[in-house]
Amino acid sequence: MGMTMTQVILAKHAGLERVEVGQLIQAKLDIVLGNDITTPVAIRAMEQAGLEQVWDADRIAIVLDHFVPNKDIKAAEQSKQCRQFAQKHGIRHFYDVGKMGIEHVLLPEQGVVTAGDCIIGADSHTCTYGALGAFATGIGSTDMAAGMATGEAWFKVPSAIRVELTGTLPETCSGKDVILTLIGILGVDGARYQSLEFTGEGIASLSMDDRFCICNMAIEAGAKNGIFPVDDVTLAYLKGRSEREPVVYTAEPDAVYERTVTLRLSEMQPTVSCPHLPENTKAASALSQIRIDQVVIGSCTNGRMEDMETAYHILKGKHIADGVRCIIIPATMQIYRECVERGYVTAFIDAGAVVSTPTCGPCLGGYMGILAAGERCVATTNRNFVGRMGHTDSAVYLASPATAAASALTGYITAPSRKGVYI
Amino acid sequence: MKTQGTAFCYPDHVDTDVIIPARYLNTSDAAELAKHCMEDIDTEFVKQIQPGDVIAAGWNFGCGSSREHAPLVIKTCGVGCVIAKSFARIFYRNAINIGLPILECPEAAEGISAGDHVEVDFETGIITNHTTGAGYQAQPFPPFIRNIITKGGLLASLKKDSDHE
């Protein structure tokens, strides 16, 4: 039985020739990640266990991104704990205000993660890095602590669902519509404990930003990880960026998958996940009667440069609808700066939007855009659970940056008519 | 190793955002966080829960965010065991790592109603509903997980391993 791409990477990191589905393995890690919410818990766990040393200060990444710039005194204390820990141990990839970004956009951008890696992160959206051809999965703070101390983690080898992509996306759609459609098909636990392995000729036409967005939400189908094969697009992205040499792994030709789901990219349409589960997908065009109060464009799912570019082309020279608050959050300082230099920020402000420095803030109901009872938001974020963005009686509709920007202009959920040109 | 108490029942796909809303995650103090356990799905939970009580839930319990605060607040509230039809994988891992007993058993999750008196034996995986008289056999923990639990969690097991070196 041939191994899937995920299994090949896990076998290599466990020092084994082969691995089987369900096998328990101890794997060597390339990067261990934490943020300002999960790292303090990991620091305490290390202290309680008497673990005083980190395994490799160059292979740990700590990113302050959820509640920074500090939203209140308690958040400031948590940031301070992370900062002191990073200083004490000489953590090289420590990202504080001024150089931070949303972790899953920042680490690929800065070349900290690369193809062939085995990565754990105390954040469920760590699966994003599968877009680079890495095995990356979310874990909790105790696993982070153990990973920081030993450089290893145990895994149960997952089976896989193959997602075959064919054709090319229409102009109105992006990676977000692909992953929302897939979650609608699989359900929020349809890939539980499994890998989502993307294959097919349709991949070649997907940009890295599309691929990051697709892998980012693998967890919303319950998956352990999502993964793309490494191709010219991946290698071009990594060139001059990756601080370690990328390693290209491929699935074996006779790899065994539990099932195959085929998605025809050319048949995608702007898709929205309705409250209160990401699997509640509908065509954006079928929701045009739903009035909205807020739009959020940003997050680890859709705060990348292409997302900003899409929002710019739709919002420039227009004005958002009366009664709608539009919050745009470039995901890293580099993207933020690029938005300033390209004139996007001016266009967003002229359109009536606000532009924030990078933060996860509103996505998880932290700050910077909390919803009141009865309010509805179209967001490019990744979860629409009860109370996720604020009051338990508020509602979040997940959508692409194009759908979110178009909706901001009308005040109702609105499908973008043509990518970049909203009429 | 056993627990027994009153059952609190919840539906499918209980996510970690309702178990402990992110608006409270500006602290990692377990006792402080536990005051808000299950707040967004059941405001009565923290008022009624007694040590040893049991949560019985549907499919995919603990989906969503990887926050370890979720199993931690459930444990801190005194819950003796979570029984579910299935668990989301990060929650499952986190619960083991911090020593919150959890059992996958669709039949038991289906057969237990809110308020039932339930007993769980972790060694054998036997779940008894004393209210209805029904018994259920859950899969007991596999050896490697039992090893982590008996050593007092993942890090405690690491500590003991390193003490031997």
Image (cartoon, coloured by chain):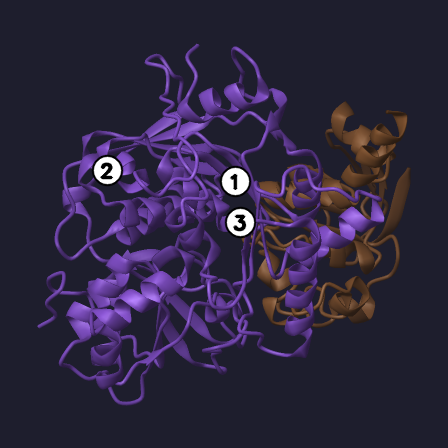
Mark 3: amino acid? Ser
Q: In the image, what residue type sits under mark 1?
A: Thr
The residue indicated by pointer 2 is A233
10 Å crowding of disc 3: few (<14), some (14-19), many (20+) = many
Label 3 vs label 1: CA separation? 7 Å
Q: Residues within 10 Å of mark 2 (few under 14, many from 20)?
A: some
Mark with earlier residue (3, 2): 3
Circle 3 SS class: helix
- Label 1 lies in what chain? A
Q: How many marks?
A: 3
Mark 3 → mark 2, Cα distance in angstroms: 25 Å
Judge from the rendering whether residue B60 lies leftward or rightward of residue A230; answer left or right: right
Q: Are marks 1 and 2 in contact (CB under 8 Å)?
A: no
Q: Reading the chain from its start, which is encountered first: label 1 or label 2?
A: 1
Chain for mark 3?
Answer: A
Badge 1 marks a residue whose secondary structure is strand
With respect to residue B46, does A238 lie above or below?
above
A42 and A270: which one is in front? A42
Chain A on-screen colour:
purple
Q: Which residue is mark 1?
A: A137
Q: CA distance from mark 1 to mark 2?
A: 22 Å
* Residue at (70, 68) in percent of width and height: B27
Q: What residue is at 37 percent from the left and 50 percent from the top? A: A109
Q: Residue at x 13, y 81 (%)?
A: A317
Return the residue nearer the eye: A236 or A292.
A236
Badge 3 and badge 2 both on one subunit:
yes
User: Residue A110, percent across and down?
Assistant: 41, 49
Q: For the point 37% across and 70% down, which residue is it?
A: A329
**Residue picked out by circle 3:** A124
Give the chain ID for the brown colour.
B
Residue A358 can be seen, yes or no: yes
Q: Which one is in front in this view, the residue at disc 1 or the one at disc 2?
A: 2
